[in-house]
């Protein structure tokens, strides 16, 4: 512990055991982190003790802390609210920071005699009415466009009544998407009625709008105003057509927001799905860094709703939040009515969380140029195996031989959940002959990490110069133990697991020194591990077959007197196949290193001479 950290810890140990907010500052006095605590002394002193339990982000923050301040509060709830307020004011570097109001959208209603409705990104200085803010500019624009189409409101640049009867009507009028105020045939009261109905529609009171339009249509029909009744009918049909395109996702009509987090290392993506009336009405996503824990979820929700003007009836979260009761109280007070925060365990809520999480993984994968299923599989493999980090670079090994002959091994690499063939390697077993799979595993892993020691300073991005995050072996606990023995002298902390097959040669479980881990119930992990096991088996068997075939052909050459294994290999390096050797002339054969003119003639006669000539070559 350095002098500065020691001094900060001594200061922290003098803090009271009461609720409050602490404010971390750097050497320039700038606020870099704000947090809350139930007991200030306990929470703040943790930062300046051992750093082993902290994430990388927290360790970096602590390194930059030069001093801290604190504010005592009467309760945990007061500390929670104060923390949120101070974060919004100061935007500290190491807190979760979401977008401010400049990312919002509004619905603008002009104050002209003929009011117009439009979607805008900023409030302007005009004497207009603004509804919002809304968090999704896409949703706002889509809703305004729908309202203008259904109620046939003008979307052109003309100003009324100034431009009435000045110029021809635009295309929207001719395709029946505008009532044609510019023609002078639409009285102001009729236009104002359509604007009011459009605003009710945008407010989400669709059933009320349909009921009102139906009553007006019926009245107009009874008064024999059939043209007017037809206008109302067309508006009703347009609204119902729009509704039929929306997918009902939930059985409940309560307003609810669903939150889920996807993690890949210290990269996080939070997705929010917003439901109203059983329909998905909006979605948002945020990229963060850090650890996806209970504190992070509470911090995120406090900032998220601190920036919004409305809170739903229900907030559904994928995992528990820190200080959940205080969070629920804050949201209830902001809403003015009861708001519940829950983590569903079954039923519809779990389905919504899964849908939300899938979207989060997909967004995170798109950011990294990958697929959502690959990111999710690696994260779930990390959790299943209890790994410290996401295994983005996985090496896998398999042994192949024929009854102990032509022993070989294949090494494949999966990078970010996909085969990375540039880093594939093959090994021919050299230290023994015969069948010994454990001995083979020890040899190839020893050779592999000896190569690492030779090339580790070359900043290699693949191959032997890069350490894997995880090693998967084709086999059970015996192979795992053999590899761990080989790794021990290198002092490398690399997790090693085996891939176990059932009696039908399908992946069944993952073996480790404590037994077996079943993976059949986890579809993402099962698919990934099965793919790795099949690929390493294919690669090693392919190399073995090639080597075995070559050794068989080499054997036929060694039947010739004077041709040993090394000269046979030299001939194959030059001609590649037996067919090419048979077709070669004596002169061409004699050009191979180690092949004398006499040997060249023997080889030629062996494949092309009479039986007597062939026999004389033995």
Image: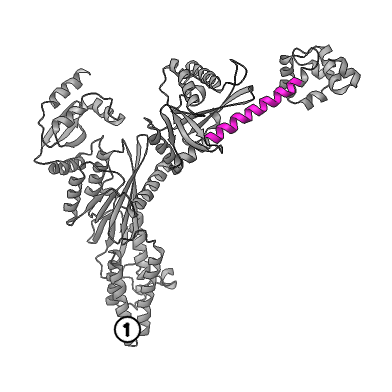
Q: Nearer the viewer, residue 4 or 453?
A: 453
Q: Residue at x 59, y 33 (%)?
A: 538
Across and down, in percent, residue 101 comes to 26, 49
Residue 156 visible in the snapshot = no
Q: Nearer the viewer, residue 535 or 583?
A: 535
The front one of 6 and 385 is: 385
- The C terminus lies in which quarter of the figure? top right
Give the colour scheme shown: one colour
Residue 542 picture location, percent across and down? 63, 30
**Residue 550 magenta:** yes
Q: Is residue 103 visible?
A: yes
Query: Hey, which quadrant is residue 495 in on the image?
Result: top left
Tell me the crowding category of disc 1: few under 14, some 14 to 19, or many 20 or more residues within 10 angstroms, Cα based.
some
Q: Quadrant of residue 275?
A: bottom left
Name the residue tied to disc 1: 220
Magenta segment, which residues?
A: 533-555
> Where does the image place residue 569, in percent across and percent down from the top left?
71, 18
Secondary structure, mark 1, is helix
Q: Name the outermost residue toward the front.
A: 503
Q: Locate the N terminus by quadrant.
A: top left
Where is residue 183? Give x, y as percent: 37, 76
Q: Is residue 588 left or right of residue 384?
A: right
């Amino acid at each position: 512990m350095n002098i500065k950290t020691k001094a900060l810890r001594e200061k922290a140990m003098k803090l009271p055991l009461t609720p409050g907010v602490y404010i971390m500052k750097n050497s320039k006095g700038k606020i870099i982190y704000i947090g809350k605590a139930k007991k200030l002394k306990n929470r703040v002193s943790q930062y300046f003790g051992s750093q082993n339990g902290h994430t990388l982000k927290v360790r970096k923050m602590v390194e930059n802390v030069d001093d801290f301040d604190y504010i005592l509060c009467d309760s945990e709830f007061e500390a929670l609210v104060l923390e949120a307020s101070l974060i919004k004011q100061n935007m500290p570097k190491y807190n979760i920071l979401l977008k401010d109001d400049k990312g919002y959208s509004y619905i603008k209603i002009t104050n002209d005699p003929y009011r117009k409705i439009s979607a805008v990104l900023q409030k302007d200085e005009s004497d207009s009415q603004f509804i919002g803010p809304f968090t999704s500019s896409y949703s706002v624009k889509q809703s305004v466009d729908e309202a203008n189409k259904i109620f046939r409101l003008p979307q052109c640049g003309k100003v009324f009544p100034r431009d009435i009867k000045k110029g021809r009507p635009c295309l929207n009028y001719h395709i029946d998407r505008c009532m044609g105020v510019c023609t002078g045939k639409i009285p102001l009261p009729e236009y104002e009625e359509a604007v009011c109905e459009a605003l009710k529609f945008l407010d989400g009171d669709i059933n009320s709008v349909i009921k009102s339009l139906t009553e007006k249509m019926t009245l107009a029909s009874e008064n024999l105003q059939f043209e007017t009744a037809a206008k109302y009918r067309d508006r009703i049909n347009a609204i119902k057509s729009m509704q039929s395109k929306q997918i009902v996702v939930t059985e409940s009509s309560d307003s609810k927001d669903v939150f889920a987090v996807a993690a890949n290392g210290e990269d996080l993506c939070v997705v929010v799905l917003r439901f109203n009336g059983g329909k998905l009405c909006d979605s948002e996503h945020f990229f963060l860094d850090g650890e996806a824990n209970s504190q992070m979820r509470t911090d995120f929700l406090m900032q998220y709703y601190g920036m919004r003007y409305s809170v739903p009836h229900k907030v559904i979260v994928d995992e528990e939040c820190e200080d959940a009761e205080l969070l629920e109280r804050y949201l209830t007070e902001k809403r003015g009515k009861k708001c519940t925060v829950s983590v569903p365990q079954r039923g519809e809520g779990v389905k919504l969380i899964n849908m939300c999480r899938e979207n989060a993984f997909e967004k995170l994968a798109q950011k990294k140029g990958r697929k959502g299923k690959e990111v999710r599989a690696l994260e779930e493999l990390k959790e299943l195996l209890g790994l410290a980090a996401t295994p983005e670079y996985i090496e896998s090994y398999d042994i192949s031989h024929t009854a102990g002959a032509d022993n070989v091994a294949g090494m494949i690499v999966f990078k970010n959940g996909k085969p990375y063939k540039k880093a594939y390697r093959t090994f021919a077993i050299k230290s023994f002959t015969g069948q010994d799979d454990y001995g083979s595993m020890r040899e190839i892993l020893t050779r592999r990490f000896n190569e690492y020691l030779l090339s580790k300073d070359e900043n290699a991005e693949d191959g032997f110069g890069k350490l894997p995050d995880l090693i998967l072996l084709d086999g059970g606990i015996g192979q795992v133990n053999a590899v761990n023995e080989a790794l021990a002298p290198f002092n490398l902390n690399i997790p090693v697991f085996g891939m176990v097959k059932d009696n039908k040669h399908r992946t069944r479980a993952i073996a480790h020194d404590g037994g077996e881990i079943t993976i059949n119930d986890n579809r993402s992990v099962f698919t990934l591990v099965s793919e790795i096991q099949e690929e390493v088996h294919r690669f090693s068997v392919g190399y073995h077959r090639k080597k075995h075939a070559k050794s068989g052909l080499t054997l036929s050459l060694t039947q010739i007197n004077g041709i040993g294994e090394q000269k046979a290999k030299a001939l194959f390096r030059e001609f590649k196949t037996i067919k090419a050797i048979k077709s070669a002339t004596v002169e061409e054969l004699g050009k191979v290193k180690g092949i004398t003119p006499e040997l060249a003639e023997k080889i030629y006669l062996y494949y092309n001479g009479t039986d007597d000539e062939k026999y004389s070559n033995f």
